[in-house]
Image: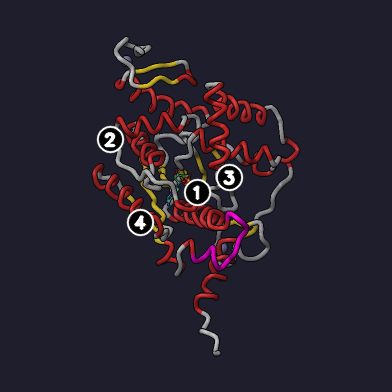
């Protein structure tokens, strides 16, 4: 297989794009594609201050590297969730994020959930007993809250995450199977900041296949945590990814088409009636962040409940 651009040996064949590239051309193709998404969806400009949420995994570290290469000013945020199973999953991912930042002289801010709230994600999930995917829902809620708060306190213009096409297509697949129109409406490559206090959020890698980013991280010699979060095992999102992957094998490009045609259908008015249904946000009296609840936001409720249980004096026999 030869590179389409220079006829040297190709390092990757992307059947989804009918495109094979050599190392040199692939390593310029990925940042070019990212820049295209940033511009197409008007995610941010070089004037903006960017906060990259880095998990220590390949996607967010590759994203941080690409943004720097493209000349964007981006600081990192690592949220230590205190997940200590699987040989210290959180502390190992933290080390990868920190080493990446140190090697490149980049600024990385770390928020430690255990220090901040007094308990790990596992502990909070045990106490709150939330549904079957409880750990993931507690974790998602906590990450979103901390990302938003850090972006606002640090006066960042936008918070970016490493979600790739496989992530987005899997979320879309799940939301479509259940016709969750509210979630479908809000699934966008970029969400604007709101007056109520949400920071702008963007996903610059949303059109890149996970395999393409993995190849990029490998060729760039980015060191990252290869393990999945121990709680992700058996999650619906993994089942959806596998289903989409088997479709992709038979029909290369189907994942990208699924995602892009969804975005197009929305631009053409799908869910338009929902767009007009205003959601009324209030300000949480405890943390000052926006919430649909009339009183405290879901984050404050959760962690207050956790603290109450932890601090309860032991019952007398
Ligand atoms: P995930 O939900 O684990 O697939 O992660 C999606 C994106 O969220 C990653 O690409 C990161 O940008 C961000 N993210 C996930 N975990 C963390 C974390 N512990 N700290 C900061 N950002 C994270
Ligand atoms: Zn080439
Ligand atoms: Zn709150």
Which residue was labeled with disc 1?
233
Q: Position of residue 122 (x, y in %)?
A: 48, 62
Disc marking residue 46: none
Q: Which residue is mark 2?
A: 221
The residue beneath circle 4 is: 87
Crowd around label 2: few <14 · some 14–19 · many ≥20 (10 Å): few
Instruction: Report the magenta residues as a range.
Output: 123-133
Q: Which one is earlier in the sequence, the residue at label 1 or at label 2?
A: 2
Residue at horizontal 41%, vertical 29%? 212
User: Which corner quadrant of the image does residue 12 belong to?
Assistant: top left
* Image disc number at residue 236: 3
Residue 103 is covered by the magenta coloring: no
Would residue 125 be counted in the magenta stretch? yes
Identify the mark nearer the N-term, 1 or 4: 4
Q: Is mark 3 within 8 Å of ligand 1?
A: no
Q: Is residue 279 visible?
A: yes
Q: Quadrant of residue 153?
A: bottom left
Q: CA distance from mark 1 to mark 4?
A: 16 Å
- Please identify, in this view, whether the residue under mark 4 or under mark 2 is nearer the observer: 4
Q: Kindly report the distance in space between the C-alpha atoms of the residues bearing marks 4 and 3.
A: 24 Å
Instruction: Residue lying at the far bottom in this picture: please name it.
Output: 317
Q: Callout 1: helix, strand or loop?
A: loop
């Amino acid at each position: 297989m030869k590179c389409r651009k220079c006829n040297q040996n190709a390092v990757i064949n992307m059947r989804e794009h009918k495109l094979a590239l050599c190392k040199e051309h692939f390593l310029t193709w990925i940042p070019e594609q990212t820049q295209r998404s940033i511009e197409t969806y008007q995610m941010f400009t070089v004037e903006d201050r960017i906060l990259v949420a880095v998990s220590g995994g390949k996607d967010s570290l590759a994203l941080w590297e690409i943004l720097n290469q493209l000349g964007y000013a981006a600081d990192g945020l690592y949220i230590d969730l205190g997940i200590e199973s699987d040989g210290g999953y959180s502390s190992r991912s933290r080390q990868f994020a920190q080493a990446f930042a140190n090697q490149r002289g980049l600024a990385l801010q770390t928020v430690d959930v255990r220090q901040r709230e007094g308990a790990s994600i596992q502990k909070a999930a045990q106490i709150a007993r939330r549904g079957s995917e409880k750990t993931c829902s507690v974790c998602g809620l906590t990450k979103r809250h901390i990302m938003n708060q850090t972006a606002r306190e640090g006066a960042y213009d936008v918070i970016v995450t490493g979600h790739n096409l496989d992530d987005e297509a899997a979320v879309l697949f799940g939301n479509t199977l259940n016709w969750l129109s509210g979630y479908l409406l809000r699934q966008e490559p970029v969400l604007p900041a709101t007056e109520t206090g949400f920071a702008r959020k963007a996903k610059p890698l949303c059109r890149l296949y996970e395999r393409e980013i993995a190849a990029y991280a490998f060729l760039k010699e980015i060191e990252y945590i290869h393990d999945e979060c121990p709680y992700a095992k058996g999650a619906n999102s993994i089942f959806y990814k596998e289903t989409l992957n088997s479709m992709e094998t038979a029909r290369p490009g189907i994942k990208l088409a699924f995602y892009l045609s969804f975005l197009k259908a929305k631009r053409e008015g799908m869910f338009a009636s929902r767009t007009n249904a205003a959601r009324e946000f209030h300000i949480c009296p405890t943390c000052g962040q926006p919430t649909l609840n009339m009183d405290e936001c879901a984050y404050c409720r959760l962690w207050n409940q956790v603290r109450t249980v932890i601090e309860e004096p032991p019952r007398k026999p």
